[in-house]
């Protein structure tokens, strides 16, 4: 099974996708005149500028839902894997993906807002919607919707819950175990799986508003707590920070470290973590109540910075500054790194060892708790994304109890993922991420050549901003944007 998954991943995550992700980010950065830099202050201002309505959630709630998807296992176990397989230089390429990906995140999220719909009293939108309306290719939209439901409803949840289970087992032990049809499983993992699935069920059966209300409280709390802990550890080793930064940059380009491995793993884990171009962010962006589509696009661009430049960097610095990393295939360590060949690089173990080296046993427990919040909120985002794509499909075909089936399937995937091996879970998750990235990035690139609606929206927003309007408006017909039915009706 693992060999088959690895073979599929080698095709999906070929150099073509790596260059596509980086190239699209650079392309949209140039087209928007590096909007991720020019309008940085505006992004922060917009975070709290809109309020929740009966149909939509606020910009901050949309950011929280989006961040709950971006900030997850990738920020702890994913960063460890990038360093473990690609070397310290992989961190540099994660930064590159984040910087360029912020422009891609603006494009896809603005498109999500432009082509959103009102469905049964709430806003819906995402790549499937703008692929159908802007590209006019319903078959393509269906492929994305089905692929996304499979990816975020069945494949990716296992990655998140697997890391929760591994972290809990490392923190609380695995002395007692039970023989099951899935193999020998520790009681720690079984108990963890039951708790996670139970809490998840209570929230997702409450709908998108409950998800938004939970994430707007949990996400800022967990992110701030994790960053404060990281700053504390970095502060204790502050004299070593310049050398760590130098090592990251040098290792990103040295043949000895393997430029291909560093770039490949940096981009793969970067895309997995911040989701720029992956097509997941536009779902939350479309659900928000804003005056102009460009506003939520800018907010979503800022979320990429929070995810990678803040949280992923915090993890990377903790691992590197405490010397708790290795590169696979190297027998005697690399750049002073400590080889721990008995530990899976795809697990959160390296991050836990980094904190344990400074804080003792509390370090492992802290990472287990942080990972629970990070991964759990991502599971909430995954459900919402899957639900949105089910809603897209049921516009054409309805099945009795389709959302109930989705909820049960996702919860089953979470339970299974908690007790299975990390490599298998990550392999399945990488397939899901890769498929979504291919489909979405190609779509938004084609859309540029079919009228570039997201670019037109940005120019319109900047023109109104320059004019000093007190309230923004969006007239898609005046801008030559077709099929933006929601905005045409509400204008």
Image (cartoon, rainbow, N blue to C red):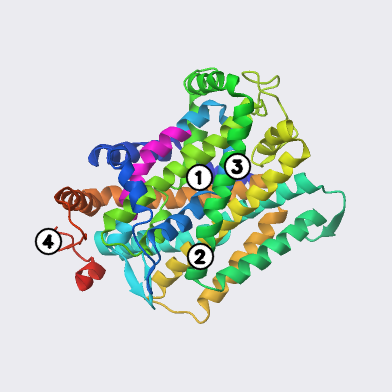
Front in this rendered view, residue 104 or 147 = 104
Q: Identify the magenta region.
A: 94-109
Q: Which mark is residue 76?
A: 3
Residue at 56%, 26% in the rendered image:
88
Label whose residue precedes the other's in the sequence (2 or 1): 2
Closer to viewer: mark 2 or mark 4: 2
Q: CA distance from mark 2 to mark 4?
A: 36 Å
* Residue ID for mark 2: 213
Discs 3/2, front: 2
Observer-nearest of 415 and 124: 124
Q: Nearer the viewer, residue 137 or 45?
A: 45
Query: Mark 1 and mark 2 in contact (Cβ < 8 Å)?
Result: no
Circle nearer the N terminus (3, 2): 3
Disc marking residue 273: 1
Q: Earlier in the sequence, mark 4 or mark 3?
A: 3
97 is within the stretch colored magenta: yes
Q: Which mark is residue 26?
A: none
Would you say the residues marked 1 and 4 are in contact, meaning their CB atoms lie under 8 Å apart? no
Q: In the rendered view, tell whether residue 474 sits above or below residue 275.
A: below
Please give the name of the residue rendered at 44% of the width and 60% of the height, measured from the top-left corner: 61
């Amino acid at each position: 099974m693992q060999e088959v998954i690895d073979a599929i991943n080698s095709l999906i995550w070929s150099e073509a996708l790596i260059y596509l992700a980086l190239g699209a980010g650079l392309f949209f950065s140039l087209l928007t005149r590096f909007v991720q830099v020019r309008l940085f202050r505006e992004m922060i201002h917009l975070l709290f500028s809109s309020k929740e309505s009966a149909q939509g959630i606020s910009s901050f709630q949309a950011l929280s839902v989006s961040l709950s998807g971006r900030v997850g296992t990738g920020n702890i176990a994913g960063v460890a894997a990038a360093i473990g397989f690609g070397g310290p230089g992989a961190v540099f390429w994660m930064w590159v993906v984040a910087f360029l990906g912020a422009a891609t995140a603006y494009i896809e999220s603005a498109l999500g807002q432009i082509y959103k719909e009102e469905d049964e009293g709430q806003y819906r939108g995402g790549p499937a919607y703008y692929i159908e309306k802007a590209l006019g290719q319903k078959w393509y939209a269906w492929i994305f919707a089905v692929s996304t439901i499979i990816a975020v409803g069945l494949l990716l949840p296992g990655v998140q819950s697997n890391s929760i289970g591994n972290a809990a087992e490392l923190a609380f032990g695995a002395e007692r175990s039970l023989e099951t049809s899935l193999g020998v499983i520790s009681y720690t993992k079984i108990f963890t799986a039951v708790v996670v699935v139970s809490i998840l069920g209570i929230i997702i059966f409450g709908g998108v508003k409950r998800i938004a209300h939970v994430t707007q409280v949990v996400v800022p709390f967990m992110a701030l707590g994790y960053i404060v802990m990281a700053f504390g550890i970095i502060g204790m080793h502050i004299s070593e920070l310049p050398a760590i930064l130098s090592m990251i940059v040098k290792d990103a380009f040295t043949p000895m470290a393997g430029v291909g491995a560093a770039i490949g793993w940096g981009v793969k884990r970067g895309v997995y973590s911040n989701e720029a171009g992956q097509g997941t962010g536009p779902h939350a962006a479309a659900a928000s109540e804003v005056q102009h589509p460009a506003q939520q696009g800018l907010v979503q661009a800022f979320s990429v910075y929070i995810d990678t430049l803040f949280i992923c960097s915090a993890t990377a610095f903790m691992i590197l500054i405490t010397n708790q990393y290795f590169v696979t295939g190297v027998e005697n360590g690399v750049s002073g790194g400590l080889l721990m060949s008995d530990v899976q690089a795809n697990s959160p173990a390296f991050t836990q060892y980094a904190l344990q080296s400074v804080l003792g046993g509390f370090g492992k427990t802290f990472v287990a708790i942080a990972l629970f919040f990070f991964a759990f909120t991502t599971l909430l985002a995954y459900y919402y994304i899957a639900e949105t794509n089910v809603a897209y499909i049921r516009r054409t075909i309805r099945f009795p109890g389709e959302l109930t089936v989705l909820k049960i399937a996702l919860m089953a995937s979470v339970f299974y993922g908690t007790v299975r091996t990390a490599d298998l879970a990550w392999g399945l998750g990488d397939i899901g991420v890769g498929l979504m990235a291919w489909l979405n990035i190609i779509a938004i690139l084609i859309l540029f050549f079919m009228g570039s609606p997201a670019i037109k929206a940005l120019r319109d927003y900047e023109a109104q901003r320059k004019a000093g309007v007190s309230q923004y408006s969006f007239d898609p017909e005046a801008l030559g944007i077709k099929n933006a039915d929601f905005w045409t009706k509400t204008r």
